[in-house]
Image: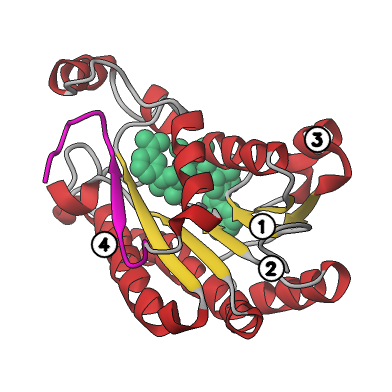
């Protein structure tokens, strides 16, 4: 049975900071991992370091046709997928008045459409196997309205949260769980490069734990949700924000 051995996980946005940590976590736990990002070359260093357990796939998740083709190839060459982590995402910090329709569409296309296209390709196989896990990387911004994050970004992540609920309800009777994470301020370029020093210092004063989140902490939580032990959790969006928002 797939849940015990030879498990294949698909991780999107695998060349990014969080994606790489998630890939490393799965490989360390004996999964084979299809590492998806815009360009397969971006994953070459990681794939050559981690060896044959990593299958690097260059793919734009916002392109439905390309997603369908890549998914069919993956399933034909490597068998069924038991875990999907929708982690690919782009940030936009513009608030509504500064957000152009093009920016809105681009952010929605990657963060929300992409996750839907990926889930659509792998969900049927999971249901057929009677086991599967989908984890969607949402954001703290869906609960706060976006402290520093912009309108398109938080709206796309809010949509991803509701997609999580819908997929969870559809799949629960088939041994498939679907959950999301709402991380706040993980130590990645989204924080180190896309926020000003002033914003970072202000946030550190606000985060009760007194630091930013490490990518590995998020990866462990994804690993838990993907595990056997998390079978009774579905349709949940789990906070990981150092106490910045409590509900
Ligand atoms: N860093 C944070 O504090 C934070 C907080 C909450 C949520 N998140 C979410 O976590 C996820 C990962 O964030 P990160 O900080 O590692 O960002 P990152 O920018 O380091 O990684 C994102 C990856 O997604 C890839 N990507 C972008 N568009 C793509 C597309 N169309 N198709 C395939 N891949 C694409 C990028 O190439 C990049 O490698 C994102 O969804 C982000 O919104 C991050």
Q: Is residue 238 visible?
A: yes
Kindly identify the residue that appears in the image at 32 percent across and 32 percent down: 185
Whether disc 4's CB lies below 8 Å from ligand 1 is answered no
Where is 202 relative to 172, above or below? Answer: above
Q: Which residue is mark 3?
A: 50
Regarding mark 1 in the picture, which secondary structure is present there?
strand
Circle on res. 158: 4
Cα separation, mark 3 vs mark 1, equals 15 Å
Question: Horizontally, is 210 left or right of 72 in the view?
Answer: left
Asked if marks 2 and 1 touch (Cβ < 8 Å), the reply is: yes
**Majority SS type along the magenta span:** loop
Q: Which residue is mark 2?
A: 81
Where is 37 relative to 105, above or below? Answer: above
- Earlier sequence position, callout 4 versus callout 3: 3
Cα separation, mark 4 vs mark 1, equals 24 Å
Question: Horizontally, is 64 left or right of 205 in the view?
Answer: right
Give the magenta-colored segment's residue range. Answer: 233-247
Q: Residues within 10 Å of mark 3 (few under 14, many from 20)?
A: some
**Residue 151 in the image, given as x and y percentages of width and height:** 21, 54
**Residue 122 in the image, given as x and y percentages of width and height:** 61, 75
Cα separation, mark 4 vs mark 3, equals 34 Å
- Earlier sequence position, callout 4 versus callout 2: 2
Whether disc 2's CB lies below 8 Å from ligand 1 is answered no
Regarding mark 3 in the picture, which secondary structure is present there?
helix
Asked if marks 4 and 3 touch (Cβ < 8 Å), the reply is: no
Q: Which residue is mark 1?
A: 9
Kindly identify the residue that appears in the image at 30 percent across and 56 percent down: 237
Q: Is residue 86 visible?
A: no
Q: Quadrant of residue 170?
A: bottom left
């Amino acid at each position: 049975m797939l849940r015990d051995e030879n498990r294949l996980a698909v991780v999107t946005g695998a060349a990014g900071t969080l994606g790489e940590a998630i890939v490393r976590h799965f490989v360390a736990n004996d999964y084979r991992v299809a590492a998806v990002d815009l360009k397969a070359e971006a994953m070459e260093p990681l794939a050559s370091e981690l060896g044959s357990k990593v299958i690097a796939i260059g793919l734009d998740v916002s392109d439905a046709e390309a997603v369908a083709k890549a998914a069919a190839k993956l399933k034909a060459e490597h068998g069924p997928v038991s875990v999907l982590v929708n982690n690919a995402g782009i940030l936009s910090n513009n608030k509504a008045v500064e957000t152009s329709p093009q920016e809105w569409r681009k952010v929605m296309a990657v963060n929300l459409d992409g996750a839907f296209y990926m889930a659509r390709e792998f969900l049927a196989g999971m249901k057929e196997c009677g086991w599967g896990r989908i984890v969607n990387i949402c954001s703290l911004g869906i609960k706060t309205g976006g402290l520093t994050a912009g309108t398109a970004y938080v709206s796309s992540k809010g949509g991803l949260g509701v997609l999580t609920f819908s997929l969870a309800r559809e799949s629960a009777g088939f041994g498939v769980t679907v959950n999301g994470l709402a991380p706040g301020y993980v130590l990645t370029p989204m924080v180190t490069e896309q926020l000003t020093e002033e914003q970072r210092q202000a946030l550190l004063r606000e985060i009760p734990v007194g630091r930013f989140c490490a990518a590995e902490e998020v990866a462990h939580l994804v690993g838990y949700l993907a595990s056997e032990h998390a079978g009774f959790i579905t349709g949940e969006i789990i906070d990981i924000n150092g106490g910045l928002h409590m509900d």
